[in-house]
């Protein structure tokens, strides 16, 4: 279990992380979602004791990272695949890390095998492709067989094959009952990988919920209504208090489903050429959610209806 | 002990320490060979003359020591280190120790190698090591290199950039210390207490005039301390500088 | 060529190292002149005394000049540069020119700044710029720094790594040139023809040498030109 309480980090004038509190439950994959620059990497560095928080604290199983004895046995992390000396071989890189936490030398070969790098173990890490570096980083994270794992944007820049591999690997780690905290700026990626979601924007918490709830919350449900003469229907809809916006010769209605709109149309004797439900794109909704996190923050926490999350006439 | 082993693995699995060690040996021993080869009755070879290349070795070793830290910052492996051992003073002390040990070994090899090659080239010259001055002039090199390496590690730790650290170390030892002497009145007084001049006293100080002609060796240091207090002062300076550097690194974001 | 010069000027001044190098070079030279002038006693303070810190500035300028090219290799911006202008020699010449001009400006400001500072603190008739030697000692510094910067860019281009280039550029003038003197018989002759030793005879006329002051500067520039040609040839052939 990872717990952040009031975590804050200021770099000069930038408030990178702003009074952030959340918890990462044991034994599940928790996604850490936010657009670029939201403060995900900074938060992870603070959890791992690399950066000192300006305020607040982050605890892993109730302890600060710096107070962990042989921390690689408790927490494994991959923050950046390039944190390797380019002239050191993959095996040498893992060997010194293993030694520092009194892990057996045999464990090095085990993790190399686990990530499929045995064949290139003695090659210099500087010559590795991004995918291979990423695997080496994961091998390093798994070295101490830790129960808690942190990954910062592990699929960034990978080819589809690499992305698939990482995704499968996350699931496998979760199936083994480990706690996985993985960041991404892509909601679609997180929807596939994570069971829980911590969402931040501009350093602030936007929501912490299950992925399902978040997706439902973040997705705009609208209905497209098209017809030659919509004035009467429009005023009726207006009276019903739903949000309407014009899109060419159609209306986009949110806050009422197709059935109700159809009945309303019959009552006002409106001819319809189209009446179709529209599902908003996940990513678009997410961008709007996090784009101006301050504005939407309270709405979500108060559990407002999804429809109000995406304002009409965007 | 574990951490010493870790730092040893890290140091020796990169290439720059090997290159630097090799370069230090080639330069010092090569220079001694050059001196021995060109020596004659008017300019005879003696113990201190075999160590003329000592300054070359010193700067190369300091570059090596500084790089041992700055490359960790450059490639962010310092973060991997602090993830594995989050109480930062321990790995940093271990690193300084390992780098100092390597510097000491290279220093001894360079000094005795320089002496050996001179003896080989000019077997007839008087190169017997008997006085304590002789011993300090040769065996003392390793000690000075080791302490200088700690200073270089400290500077690297504070500046974190190879270019900056190397520039500071070179300009300080090779330019600033000697140039201070040019300041009228106070220059000489300050110079007497500058760290690398003090260290030099350990190597060149208290010559035994009955046995050696001082003029045929590197110019003696003008430091006021006696040789052993001089190396102690140099070491104390290194320890203080390193302690400051560790404190800074411990506070700072990795 | 003017576009290239403008490009290189923008590239240089949008990084931080030229700024702090300039500050440091001026601070050390002028500061040292002040220290010397403040503590001076005995004979009169001369023009030469005000330029004792010149070598500090030269070393810092060579570091700056080397970094101007090695950081391009380090961050692979050299590839972007060569992609934009495939004629590498032209690019590198433009860079060398810009760096050399900056070095010259630093040299002039450092030299005149030191001279004025010393004069203000302890000015006498000996502080006037009278002889050719006086003028070379002060106004000549910009030339020395500019040529030194060309050498540094050349070495940086050849070595491509900051640590290596800076080590060579500092160890060479500060240590190697001095140590060769110690070699019996031939040492002194070799020393006389070492580039940085030679050029010190341009700015400091009190040191006797085998050739005159302007010939010494020309020799220094010749060494720089040879290194630069070698660097350009290598950069053209090598993969960027
Ligand atoms: N070491 C640092 N110094 C100054 N600003 C930083 C530093 N690290 C991050 N920042 C700033 O903090 C903010 C958050 O960055 P980051 O944590 O990297 O975001 P993310 O990982 O979500 O993309 C950004 O505005 C970034 O520019
Ligand atoms: Mg990030």
Image: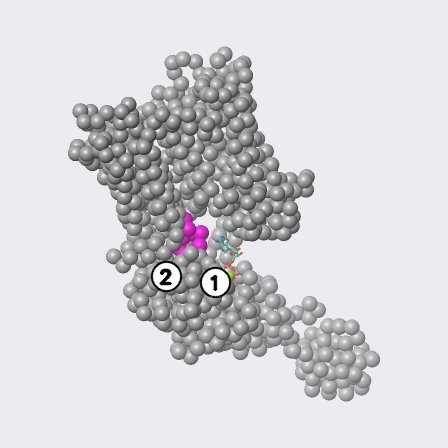
- Mark 1 secondary-structure assignment: loop
Chain letter of the residue carrying label 2:
A
Q: Which residue is disc 1 drawn over?
A: A128
Kindly identify the residue that appears in the image at 52 percent across and 27 percent down.
C219
Does the magenta run of residues contain B74? Answer: yes
- Relative height, residue A161 to residue A53 (above, below): below
Nearest the eye: C203 or A145 = C203
Q: What range is drawn magenta here?
A: B70-78
> How far from the left and from the top, in percent, is residue B122?
26, 33
- Compare marks 2 and 1 and give the one earlier in the sequence: 2
Q: CA distance from mark 2 to mark 1?
A: 14 Å
Residue A28 versus residue B147: which sits nearer the camera?
Answer: B147
Give yes or no for residue A202 being in the magenta stretch: no
Q: At x 53% / y 37%, what residue is drawn?
A: C227
Read off the chain for label 1: A
Residue pictured at 33% horizontal, 70% vertical: A107
Is residue C23 something one can see in this rendering? no
Question: Split into 4 quadrants, where in the image is the N terminus of chain C?
Answer: top right
Cβ–Cβ under 8 Å for marks 2 and 1: no
Instruction: Estimate the x, y position of residue A206 in percent, counting from the top left.
Output: 53, 67
Q: Quadrant of residue A109?
A: bottom left
Q: Which residue is mark 2?
A: A92
Magenta part mainly helix, strand or loop? Answer: helix
């Amino acid at each position: 279990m990872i717990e952040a309480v009031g975590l804050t980090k200021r770099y000069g004038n930038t408030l990178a992380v702003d009074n952030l509190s959340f918890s990462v439950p044991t034994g599940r994959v928790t996604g850490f979602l936010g657009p670029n620059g939201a403060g995900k990497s900074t938060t992870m560095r603070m959890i791992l004791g690399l950066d000192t928080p300006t305020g607040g604290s982050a605890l892993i199983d109730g302890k600060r990272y710096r107070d962990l004895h042989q921390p690689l046995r408790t927490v494994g992390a991959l923050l950046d695949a390039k944190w390797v000396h380019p002239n050191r071989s993959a095996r040498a890189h893992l060997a010194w890390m293993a030694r520092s936490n009194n892990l057996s030398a045999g464990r090095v070969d085990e993790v190399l095998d686990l990530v499929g790098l045995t064949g290139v173990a003695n090659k210099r890490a500087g010559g590795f492709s991004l995918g291979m570096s990423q695997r080496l980083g994961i091998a390093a994270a798994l070295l101490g067989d830790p129960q808690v794992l942190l990954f910062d944007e592990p699929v960034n820049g990978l080819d589809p094959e690499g992305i698939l591999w990482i995704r499968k690997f996350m699931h496998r780690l979760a199936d083994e009952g480990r706690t996985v905290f993985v960041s991404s700026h892509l909601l679609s990626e997180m929807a596939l990988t994570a069971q829980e979601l911590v969402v931040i924007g501009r350093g602030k918490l936007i929501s912490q919920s299950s992925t399902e709830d978040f997706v439902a919350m973040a997705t705009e449900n609208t209905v497209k209504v098209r017809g030659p003469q919509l004035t009467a229907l429009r005023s009726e809809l207006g009276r019903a208090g739903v949000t309407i916006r014009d899109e060419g010769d159609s209306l986009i209605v949110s806050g009422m489903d197709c059935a109700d709109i159809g009945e309303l149309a019959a009552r006002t004797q409106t001819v319809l050429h189209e009446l179709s439900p529209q599902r908003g794109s996940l990513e678009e909704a997410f961008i709007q959610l996090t784009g101006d996190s301050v504005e939407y923050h309270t709405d979500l926490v108060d559990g407002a209806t999804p429809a109000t999350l995406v304002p009409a006439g965007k | 002990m574990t951490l010493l082993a870790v730092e040893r693995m890290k140091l020796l699995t990169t290439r720059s320490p090997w290159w630097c060690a090799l370069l230090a040996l080639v330069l010092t021993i090569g220079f001694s060979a050059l001196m021995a080869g060109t020596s004659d009755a008017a300019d005879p070879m003696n113990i201190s003359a075999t160590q003329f290349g000592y300054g070359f070795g010193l700067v190369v070793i300091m570059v090596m020591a500084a790089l041992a830290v700055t490359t960790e910052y450059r490639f962010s492996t310092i973060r991997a280190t602090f993830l594995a051992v989050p109480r930062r003073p321990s790995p940093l002390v271990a690193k300084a120790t390992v780098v100092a040990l390597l510097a000491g070994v290279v220093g001894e090899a360079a000094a005795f190698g320089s002496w050996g090659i001179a003896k080989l080239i000019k077997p007839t010259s008087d190169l017997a090591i008997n006085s304590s001055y002789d011993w300090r002039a040769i065996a003392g090199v390793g000690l000075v290199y080791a302490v200088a390496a700690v200073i270089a590690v400290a500077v690297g730790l504070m500046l974190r950039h190879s270019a900056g650290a190397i520039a500071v170390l070179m300009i300080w030892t090779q330019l600033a210390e000697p140039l201070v002497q040019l300041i009228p009145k106070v220059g000489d007084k300050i110079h007497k207490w500058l760290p690398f001049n003090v260290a030099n006293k350990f190597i060149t100080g208290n010559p035994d005039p009955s046995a050696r002609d001082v003029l045929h060796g590197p110019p003696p240091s003008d430091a006021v301390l006696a040789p052993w207090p001089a190396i102690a002062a140099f070491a104390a300076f290194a320890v203080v500088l390193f302690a400051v550097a560790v404190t800074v690194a411990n506070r700072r974001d990795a | 060529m003017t576009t290239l010069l403008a490009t290189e000027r923008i590239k240089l001044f949008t990084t931080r190292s030229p700024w702090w190098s300039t500050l440091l070079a001026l601070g050390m030279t002028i500061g040292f002149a002040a220290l010397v002038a403040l503590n001076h006693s005995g004979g009169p303070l001369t023009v030469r005394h005000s330029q004792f810190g010149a070598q500090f500035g030269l070393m810092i300028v060579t570091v700056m000049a080397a970094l101007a090219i090695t950081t391009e290799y380090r961050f692979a911006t050299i590839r972007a540069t060569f992609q934009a202008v495939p004629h590498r020699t032209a690019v590198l010449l433009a860079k060398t020119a810009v760096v050399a001009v900056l070095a010259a400006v630093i040299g002039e400001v450092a030299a005149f700044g030191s001279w004025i500072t010393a004069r203000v603190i302890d000015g006498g008739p000996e502080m006037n710029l009278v002889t050719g030697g006086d003028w070379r000692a002060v106004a000549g510094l910009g030339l020395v720094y500019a040529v030194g910067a060309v050498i540094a860019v050349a070495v940086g281009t050849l070595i491509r790594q900051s640590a290596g280039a800076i080590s060579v550029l500092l160890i060479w003038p500060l240590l190697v040139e001095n140590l060769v003197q110690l070699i019996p018989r031939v040492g002194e002759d070799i020393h006389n023809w070492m580039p940085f030793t030679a050029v010190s005879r341009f700015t400091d006329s009190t040191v006797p040498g085998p050739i005159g002051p302007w010939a010494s500067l020309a020799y220094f520039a010749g060494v720089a030109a040879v290194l630069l040609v070698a660097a350009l040839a290598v950069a053209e052939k090598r993969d960027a």
